[in-house]
Amino acid sequence: MASIYKQCVSPIVILTVIVSATHASADREENTASPVVVRSFEENFPEASRIPESAEGLDVRLTHLIDSLGDSDYSRREAAAKELGRIGPAAVDALLTAADTHRDIEIKLRAQWLVDAMPLSLQTDSQETVALLEGYKRKNLPERLKVMHHLLRLEDDKGVEPLARIVRLERSPVGSRVAAAILVREWRANDVYWEAIREPILAGIGSSDRPSAKFLRTLVLFSPKDSASLTDLEAAIKHLHSSDEDASIGLSTDDETGSLELTTSRIFSRCYCELLLAANRHADAILAATTILDECILRWKEAADDNSRESAMGSLVSMLAWTIEQNIPEASDHVERLIGNRTSDAHLHYAFARAAMQRGDKTKAEQIARTVLANNQDQPVEHLQSAILLARWGCVEWARNEYTAVISNAATPAPQFVLASIFFSEFLHDRQSDG
């Protein structure tokens, strides 16, 4: 990459971009470029300099300038880079699109360099925020993710707008998705905290047309009583899942990146489902939930080895538990119909039992629980894992039965017996405290 970069971007361009980015704010305040920059631009782009200074005109102007970053004429390349630097933040979205999708490698690299040269922090940011953002663009992805989470935890919501700014300016689509997902997870219906951070989020994402930014903007503007906002919401989630950002999910050769893409996709999908519930569109919410569950089932079916299969089943159970917590236990019927007879996984069938209990079918729920308990006979590890999960779900009697099955069995190995005794004791203590 270094050798390619040296061939495409001269040291003069690098210096020009840095200087342009440093002085862009001052140039914009004066609402004019220096005489040299203006003269160079007008001389090199007489047709572009006549484009009106309107929103539509700016789009045409940006397209022309970005294409000129790969011009064979050195003077035109330099003039285009200077003018884009002068335009500053208004050019960010177009430059990011070019950096992500342009077929010309020279234009991709120059566009990325121009974006990277733009400062991420603003003069209005707190000192703590500026310190966190210092060197952000030079950090690797895991380090940048830590900064994102830290920004969200700053007092008085000082890091919310900068975090939303990262959604717009983060160099990688995956990083942008993660920043958006962190903010999306903060949404709760009728939540006072969410109301307080709506404006900072909008200020941060600006006019970004990245799919994750569009979904975040739609979420901020969402009103359960406004049918138009529901239509916008549906369009935003479809755009998100059909975008190039989302198309790579599951196909990435980088395990870490692939996992992040999958996790963020599920966060967006679950939020969409919760929004439908907030709008009293129960049937649509169930349909949205089954779509998420279908993706989990597919991953379980296509798992390449036992570890992957176990992980996929864990994700499916977790997602099914989430649907129950959202009061849409009907979604479990879909999973039970598709794979209920294809696996005896104890956690999955306990989820079926929990869903049946929530829907008032106690007979079915108890029958499933008894069957699972019997199937785990003489399997202390499975009994213990089920007991821990059921206790977390609040299924008291079923958890008690599983703990008892471990402790009362003389064949239980010592390690499992000790663990079960400790956890069961804590479980009983918690129940006594709650009672």
Image (spheres, rainbow, N blue to C red):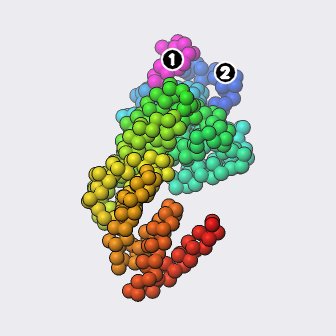
**Picture disc at residue 130:** none
What residue is at 46 percent from the left and 28 percent from the top?
A: 231
Query: Which of disc 1 and disc 2 is earlier in sequence?
Result: 2
**Picture disc at residue 31:** 2
Relative to 115, 119 lies left or right: right
Q: Disc 1 on helix, strand or loop?
A: helix
Quadrant containing the C terminus in the rendered view? bottom right
Q: How many marks?
A: 2
In the image, is residue 340 above or below residue 380? above
Whether residue 191 can be seen here: yes
| Place of residue 417 in the rendered image (x, y in percent of width and height, measured from the top left) | 46, 83
What residue is at 37 percent from the left and 45 percent from the top?
A: 290
Depth check: 359 or 346 in front? Answer: 359
Please report the bounds of the magenta region as a residue range. 42-65
Q: For mark 1, does the 10 Å Cα neighbourhood hold few (<14), some (14 to 19), or many (20 or more) residues? A: few
| Place of residue 281 in the rendered image (x, y in percent of width and height, measured from the top left) | 46, 35
Tell whether position 33 is magenta. Answer: no
Q: For mark 2, does the 10 Å Cα neighbourhood hold few (<14), some (14 to 19), or many (20 or more) residues? A: few
Q: Disc 2 on helix, strand or loop?
A: loop
Residue under pointer 1: 56
Relative to 405, 115 lies left or right: right
What residue is at 67 percent from the left and 30 percent from the top?
A: 25
| Place of residue 170 in the rendered image (x, y in percent of width and height, measured from the top left) | 53, 42
Tell whether position 62 is magenta. Answer: yes
CA distance for labels 2 and 1: 19 Å
What residue is at 54 percent from the left and 79 percent from the top?
A: 422
Residue type (three-letter) at the residue carrying disc 2? Asn
| Place of residue 365 in the rendered image (x, y in percent of width and height, measured from the top left) | 39, 59
Residue type (three-letter) at the residue carrying disc 1? Glu
Relative to 157, 1 lies left or right: left
Helix, strand or loop for the magenta stretch, by majority: helix
Of badges 2 and 1, nearer the viewer stands 1
